[in-house]
Image (cartoon, rainbow, N blue to C red):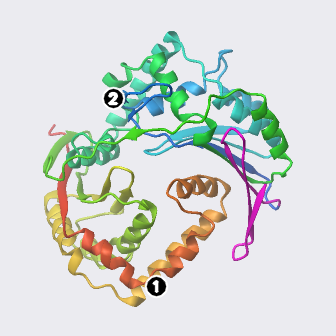
Amino acid sequence: MNKEYFEQIDETLYHEKLSNGLDVYIVPKNDYDKTFGIISTRYGGLDNRFIPYGKTEFVEYPKGIAHFLEHKLFEMEDGIDASTKFLKWGASSNAFTSFDRTSYLFSTTNNVLECTLFLLDFVQSPYFTDENIKKECGIIEQEILMYQDDPDSRLFWGTLKNLYKDNYVSTDLVGSVKSINEITKEMLYDCYETFYHPSNMQLFLIGNVDLSVIDGIRENQAKKTFKPIKEIKREYVYDEFKDNIKETKINMDIIIPKVCLGVRFKNIYNNFQMVDIKTGLLCSILCGDSSTLRMELMNKGLINDSFGYYTDFNKSASYFMLSSDSENPDKLYEEFYKFVKDIPNMKISEEDFECAKRELIGQFIGILNSLEATAQNFTSCLYSGNNLYTIINEIKKLDVKSLDEIKDMFKDIIITKYAIYPNED
């Protein structure tokens, strides 16, 4: 195994790429009782159009299929849910699907090797039938309806739908009732065989774990047969950069109205994580907890503690949101609009920048003190071409001028409004 020691944070990262292409990362932290394991595949909600393994033409799959596949992997051929087997070893398990990856994870204080090998086994043993797919459709339909009744979820996805017409980013990761009912077992096997090859996956273990676990992992993988490694070819939808929907208003069973201003940036960025970090620094200064904007809007009675911002940069979209509950949502939106349009002209002091940078570095140090946060953010950094254990050094190199390019991004933007009002009755 390759060994890399990071003196500044006193952490050692071990890495080995197995012959089947699986990347295994281990960070022993013997002063912890718990061990956290996560296996991820570079396959998420944005990966709806690709050339399936063994085929030659691009195929577009139903929206929500990555999340659907995540659910189905837990149901094994013997009819037992994988999560119940983890419980027998005193471990908890979970999974999640994001725009760019799907991850399966466990947390335990005992039986680390058993949990690790079983994590590999159930993720690498798909079992799909027409019957269990139909059953899952009913389950996920209920999940979709639940999100439809959640005002904050409607606000977020509604804003994205206003900004993007055809881009996969504008559809909830769970898909729609229509799209999930289009999913077949053949489609699931296509997606699985394309994206769940070990060469497209990473296993990360951190905590009270002995390095000898790698021997068990090697043996486990050597017993299995995998298809030859092949390049995955994907296509993303890039909407034309023009207004889609400028404003949407809906009514829901809420007491206080909600409003969101969404901003779509023109460009897609290669190292989107570093762009996100710099945008986060700018937002922390301009609209964070101690910002002038927040104080002024509070004093005017336009916002409450629900006020916040969100940024995201990925393979096919770049956007920013400002939102809050408000008794006067139209006036608040006017304030949001003026603020966003003025960002390119705003001056950032060296003192404010350094304060925000120190706070961000502190957040990353906090991440490294949490096994779960470390594992999830390590994978996120990896997919962005970065290293969680060195990214603090990259942040330290930033100066106040680093924010000029972020401010300039706000010169050419598309803006939308999404508002939710209480039901009239």
Q: From the viewer's perspective, is 415 left or right of 68?
A: left
- The x, y position of residue 37, in whole percent, is 69, 46
Q: Residue at x 61, y 40 (%)?
A: 199
Label placed on residue 354: 1
The residue that label 2 is drawn on is 176
* Residue 374 shows in the view: yes
Q: From the viewer's perspective, is 236 left or right of 339?
A: right
Could you tell me the amino acid type at mark 1? Glu
Q: Quadrant where the C terminus lies? A: top left
Magenta-span inclusion, residue 10: yes
User: What range of the chain is rendered magenta?
Assistant: 1-30
Could you tell me the amino acid type at mark 2? Ser
Neighbour tally class for label 2: few under 14, some 14-19, many 20 plus, Cα within 10 Å = some
The quadrant holding residue 51 is top left
Residue placed most toward the observer, 334 or 134: 134
Q: Residue at x 42, y 89 (%)?
A: 351
Magenta-span inclusion, residue 124: no
Q: Residue at x 34, y 40 (%)?
A: 150
**Distance between the alpha carbons at the discs numbered 2 and 1:** 44 Å
Q: Count the marks: how many? A: 2
The quadrant holding residue 206 is bottom right
Q: Where 361 sits versus 230, above or below?
A: below
Q: Residue furthest top?
A: 131
Q: From the viewer's perspective, is 37 left or right of 358?
A: right
Residue placed most toward the observer, 66 or 108: 66
Q: Where 240 sits versus 404, above or below?
A: above
Residue placed most toward the observer, 317 or 118: 317
The quadrant holding residue 137 is top left
- The x, y position of residue 413, in whole percent, is 20, 62
- The x, y position of residue 228, in whole percent, is 62, 31
- The x, y position of residue 193, in whole percent, is 55, 28
